[in-house]
Image (tube, grey):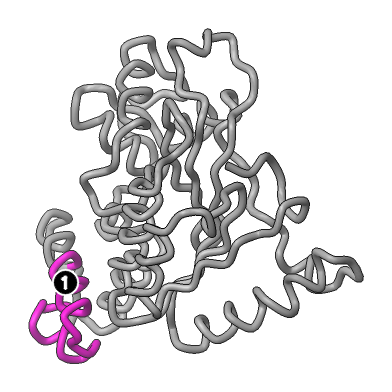
């Protein structure tokens, strides 16, 4: 079914409905018929959701909107800082640049996702994902860990059509702002194509914050397995997290051993 005659608003409503139907277990063909979309459009909406969460499902106009600049004024930065300490309402596991740009636009601060990216990078809030592919070729303890413990799990999850994420917790680098006015701890995730999702905290994350993050990842694909390669935390010390993992056997938490990643362990 052609979507050329649909307005952007109607198309986006149908794309969101298509994702809901797919989450309920409907096939692509069934979803296309019920949502009034073509099968390729349903597949595209589903792929966007799996890679970027709910905020990635609506299609966006090409080009930069009028008023969207490459810098953030003081008021926009204050809103951005406050949002980064919260959990997104969108269902994203943490904040993506696109999600932050949308949140700022909703309260009168139109800005591009690219500008958000630059702002995060300038404040040491854009950690790089681990080069797992390179680890597979290394003749080192890190390479053996990856080949023996991580790689088999990741390959099995991918084969089952599940989600694979990288993540970590870290203390961010030195900034011009005093520690008393800026949270120094960062929880972050990298999804497909290395898309960053992040939150900032005033103190090292507690068990409940980790479990909330795990639950959000699990809920993105409730009928399929999820694997998370995570560095910077020692989860074995938390009985609450061990119980959560036992209750969710389709969620595979792969700890990066100390010294194989970057940063300190909390």
Looking at the picture, tell me which residue is in the foreground, 53 or 41: 53
Residue 57: x %, y % from top left = 28, 60
Decide whether residue 165 is among the magenta residues: no
- Label the magenta part by its dominant secondary structure: helix
* On screen, residue 102 above or below 208: above
Left or right, residue 6 beside residue 224: left
Corner quadrant of residue 169: top right
Left or right, residue 241 beside residue 88: right
Decide whether residue 26 is among the magenta residues: yes
Q: Which residues are magenta?
A: 15-37
Looking at the picture, tell me which residue is in the foreground, 72 or 68: 72
In the image, farthest residue toward the right: 139
Q: Quadrant of the N terminus?
A: bottom left
Query: Which residue is disc 1 drawn over?
Result: 20
Left or right, residue 216 beside residue 185: left
At a point 29% along the width and 82% down the height, the residue shown is: 223
At a point 37% along the width and 23% down the height, the residue shown is: 81
């Amino acid at each position: 079914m052609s979507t050329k005659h649909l307005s952007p608003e109607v198309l986006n409503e149908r794309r969101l409905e298509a994702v809901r139907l797919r989450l309920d277990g409907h096939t692509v063909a069934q979803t296309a018929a019920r949502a009034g979309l073509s099968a390729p459009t349903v597949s595209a909406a589903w792929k966007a959701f799996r890679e970027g969460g709910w905020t990635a499902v609506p299609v966006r106009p090409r080009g930069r909107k009028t008023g969207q600049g490459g810098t953030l004024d003081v008021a926009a930065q204050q809103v951005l800082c406050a949002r980064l300490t919260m959990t997104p309402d969108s269902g994203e596991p943490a904040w993506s640049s696109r999600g932050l740009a949308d949140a700022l636009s909703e309260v009168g601060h139109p800005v591009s996702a690219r500008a958000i990216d630059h702002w995060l990078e300038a404040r040491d809030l854009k950690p790089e994902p681990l080069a797992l592919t390179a680890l597979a070729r290394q003749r080192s303890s890190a390479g053996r860990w990856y080949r023996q413990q991580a790689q088999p799990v990741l390959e099995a999850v991918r084969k089952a059509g599940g989600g694979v994420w990288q993540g970590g917790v870290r203390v961010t680098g030195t900034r011009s702002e005093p520690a008393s006015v800026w949270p120094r701890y960062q929880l972050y995730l990298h999804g497909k194509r290395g898309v960053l999702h992040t939150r900032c905290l005033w103190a090292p994350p507690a068990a409940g914050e980790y479990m909330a993050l795990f639950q959000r990842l699990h809920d993105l694909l409730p009928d399929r397995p999820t694997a998370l390669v995570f560095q910077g935390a020692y989860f074995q010390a938390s009985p609450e997290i061990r119980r959560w993992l036992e209750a969710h056997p389709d969620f595979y938490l792969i700890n990066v051993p100390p010294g194989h990643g970057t940063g300190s362990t909390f």
